[in-house]
Amino acid sequence: MKDIILKAENISKQYRLGQVGTGTLSHDLNRWWHEIRGKENPYLKIGDTNDRSVKGNSAYVWALQDINFEVERGEVLGIIGKNGAGKSTLLKILSKVTAPTTGSIKSRGRIASLLEVGTGFNPELTGKENIFLNGAILGMTKKEIASKLDEIVEFSGCERYIDTPVKRYSSGMTVRLAFAVAAFLEPEILVVDEVLAVGDAEFQKKAIGKMQDISKGQGRTVLFVSHNMAAVKSLCTKGIVLENGLIKYNGSVEQALDIYNSQNKLTESKICWPSAEAPGNEKAIIKSINVFSKSGFNYIEEDVFVEVFYENLIEEQVLNVSISIFDDKENYLIASPNLNREKLKKGTFKSVCKLNKNTFNTGKYFFSVLLVGNNFELIVKLESIVSIEFKEEGTKRGNFFDTWSGSLRPYFDWSNSEA
Amino acid sequence: MNNTNDKDWLFEITPKNKFFRLNLKEVWQYRDLLFLFVKRDVITVYKQTVLGPLWYLIQPLFTSVTFTIIFNNVAGINTGTIPPFLFNLAGITVWNYFTACLNGTSDTFKANASIFGKVYFPRIITPLSVVISNLIKFGIQFIIFIAFYLFYYIKGADLTLNGLVIFFPVLITVMGILGLGLGMLISSMVTKYRDFSNLVTFGIQLLMYLSAVMYPMELIKDKLPKFGWMVEYNPLAYIIETSRYMLLNTGEISVLGLCYTLLVTIAVFFVGLLIFNKTEKSFIDTV
């Protein structure tokens, strides 16, 4: 049984470019004149796609065009896309902040939106007063808030300051308090924008945990926009990729992330080509490249793997993948060829290179990938095609907290003795 | 089973509102928010001030003193047996309620753009909260009026209440609704054309002189017969004149004028609501 809780049909949203105010009156009058004669709005032409980098010829632009999707009860839908793809506009329409230009959204449940934490916080009011005010703005009744007040205060960790005006709070505390209120909302559908990007690491963990509770534990439907791909992957069950105001993909979250990542070449640790666009020639093509660690955080203290999928298109061919690693200043650090000389049959193969732990320093590293055929013939050369950011657990630092210099950071043995 | 039939949707988000929609049910659901907004407005005004709510009293008192000196002592406007100060205080207290409502509601969209841009609740809650919190402010100012009334009464001034004073709350309600209606109308215009917020600032100043605040309506008809019609067409003048009639038993009561006022109020309120409803859907794109 399919239990559709939310359905968007042909949602489009048009914005006027440039300054509102100059020429608005004349456009308004013109629009009104068309309307009373029963003609179509002259400024509502279906036209350019919304690519901000390309100069258009219209004063109006479609931030969203023909958006159709359905959400089932209990589903967690991740909405991803580059800046300006229309994510926030879609969320604004969903949360009734602005109306769509065309189309409609039908819902079977109460929608609460969290486009920002702490909306309507008044600095003069105390923490407790603000909990009530903010809760009411988000659609809770006073009774609901009162019954959850203790939990909210505990979750925020601001117990001691609860009767102090919010203007005396640190910015971190304000955010904690604000998120705590939002975390105890109980709508059927929750719409969440990039609100997890605030607060310290501990709090982010708590916030993501809470979101997981809401979606998995309580079976609530969540629509989630984020640039934090790890969060999207761990929270969402479905994904939508937006590009220039259009839905590019709607389906499983893994596939959505793959498509999104392929839009952001060089800045992502993973790249995957649809077979028509895969780099290569008639002998072989590369299908995907992925750099990853077990934890997903790419700690320098753990092994990192470079995984390359490629397809051999002719029989009896020797194929070798080779990688080169550069630091963020484009220093060539390491070349590591695969020296396997085995002849391959037709089909898809995978080569994995394990980069031993404790080799690199923290920071960004770029990977070039080569695919070499028979007689060292170069088939594909992809320069700085993927990159990862190494982080550090800090287990090997001891009491040294300053910057650790150098592009590489292996831990060599030291021995000390009296000479 | 596939329950995608179009009948059981809870609600629908569409490009335009129905032509006229006052969703009272929704407003009722958000009544706690209304209450909290009122509380916020009342509390925050005098936080971190020494005189606190006394500030509510200082302004009308000083204005009344000024008016008494200029209009009664210098210009010589005759208020009959009523002490001029009390006459002015009555007019100003009532007038202040109107200006507070209009000022407060006329920038609803502009002042609350940051909240409105992030979360949905029935937008009308905001102007409603302004009207209600100003009613509380009016109540405090009205207490000072009563205090001066008793003071003059004990001193032996010839003061009588009119029996119609029981309708005074109705009169104030009408005034609040007029202020709300006009405020909603203007706030909707301001989202696109900022010119209107300038208009309000000085328009209110001018309007006061046409609203019989510091003179009896009778007087303007006698002295300026050519311009008297401007006052006679002003519904606010009737409200102020009538409130003085109720409180101080001075001036005249015009049934025709009050009916006219009521009609204008209803018309302004509904037009205001209509435009407000139309604006709230997508003002965030233009504000």
Image (spheres, rainbow, N blue to C red):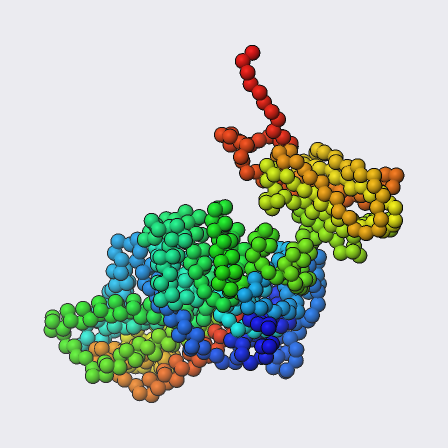
Q: Is residue B185 above or below residue A360?
A: below
Q: At x 68% / y 44%, what residue is drawn? A: A291
Q: Quadrant of the N terminus of chain A?
A: bottom right
Q: In this view, does A15 lie to the left or right of A212?
A: right
Whether residue A397 appears in this view of the structure is yes
Instruction: Identify which residue, A330 or A348, lies in the foreground.
Output: A348
- Image position, residue A57 (x, y; %): 71, 63
Work out whether residue A46 or residue A303 is closer to the camera in this orientation and state it: A303
Please, which residue is most extreme toward the top here? Answer: A419
Q: Which residue is drawn at 61% across and 42% down?
A: A298
| Quadrant of the frame with the C terminus of chain A | top right
Q: Residue furthest bottom?
A: B256
Q: Where is residue A312 in the image (x, y as percent from the top left)?
A: 83, 49
Please say whether residue B99 is visible from this viewpoint.
no
Number of disc labels? 0
Residue at position x 58%, y 72% from top?
A4
Quadrant of residue B256 within the rendered picture: bottom left
- Pick the front one: A41 or A153: A153
- x and y, in percent, of residue B45 in the image: 33, 59
The residue at the point 71 percent across, 37 percent down is: A325
Percent position of residue A79, x then y: 60, 60
Question: Residue B217, located in which quarter of the rendered image?
Answer: bottom left
Side of B200 relative to A269 (left or right)? left
Q: In this view, does A162 lie above or below B237?
A: above
Quarter of the figure with residue A101:
bottom right
